[in-house]
Image: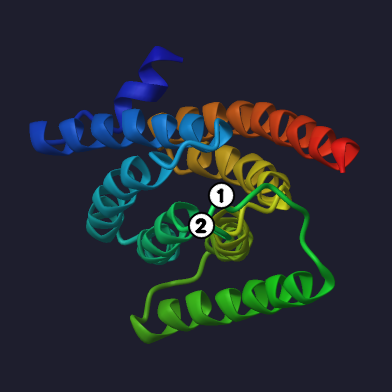
Amino acid sequence: MFEFFLKAYENATLTQIVLEITVFVFGILSVWCAKRENILVYPTGLIATIITTYLLFQADYLGDMTINIYFSIVSIYGWANWAKKSNEKEDITISRTNSKQKIIGFALFFITIFVVFGIYIYFDYEIKFDSYIDIFASGIFFVAMWFMALKKIENWTLWILGDLIVVPLYAYRGLGMLALQYLIFTILAISAYLKWKKILNSRLHIL
């Protein structure tokens, strides 16, 4: 097990190792902040996604790279959305998706799959079995990120599903550190869903 996590770093530079550790720390910190409805989810997440975009570009994992470019862009939108006031006294609050948002979510999922697949074709990269899983997970994560920006509780359901898909994917690719990171993400996402659900139910009960 110890060798599994270190083998991928046998030929890695010190810079790459430092960058991956930075991503690991700030990625987990970002999910922890999201669970607590702390707006620091976005600046911490931006640090992780920007560095990850660079690392994935170097590794030629185009689907994952595209996800993180999108994460970086939507993080800026989410940051602004969480910061603004829905009225003079109240911030944007946790809620469930409505029918229109669900439809948009499905549309984003399929558009994402089409776009990421197109990127693989455009750059003439071989699409292997794990690439299709990567593309599918990309669609899930795209929608999850958008739902999070709107503070929709369903974002955690999608994060959990996506995380459970990519944990074995990264393990298969020999990326032990990323597999461990997403395993931790899964645990945090489950905890966050339960916390947000409790907050939402409490608010609905008061109403």
Q: Amino acid at mark 1?
A: Lys
Give the residue number, with chain letter if any, for mark 1.
Answer: 89
Residue 85 badge: 2
Q: Amino acid at mark 2?
A: Lys
The residue drawn where x is 63% and y is 46% is 159
Secondary structure at numbered mark 2: loop
User: Can you give x and y, in whole percent of width and height, for residue 34 in the image?
Assistant: 52, 38
User: Can you give x and y, in whole percent of width and height, for residue 82 in the image?
Assistant: 49, 53
User: Can you give x and y, in whole percent of width and height, for residue 50 in the image?
Assistant: 27, 54
Choose top left, top right, bottom left or bottom right for residue 164.
top right
Choose top left, top right, bottom left or bottom right for residue 80.
bottom left
| Residue nearest the viewer, comparing 129 with 180 | 180
Residue located farthest toward the front when viewing the structure as drawn: 88
The residue drawn where x is 59% and y is 61% is 129
User: Can you give x and y, in whole percent of width and height, for residue 110 in the image?
Assistant: 66, 77
The coloring applied to the image is rainbow
Crowding near the residue tagged with mark 2, few <14, some 14–19, many ≥20 C-alpha atoms within 10 Å: few
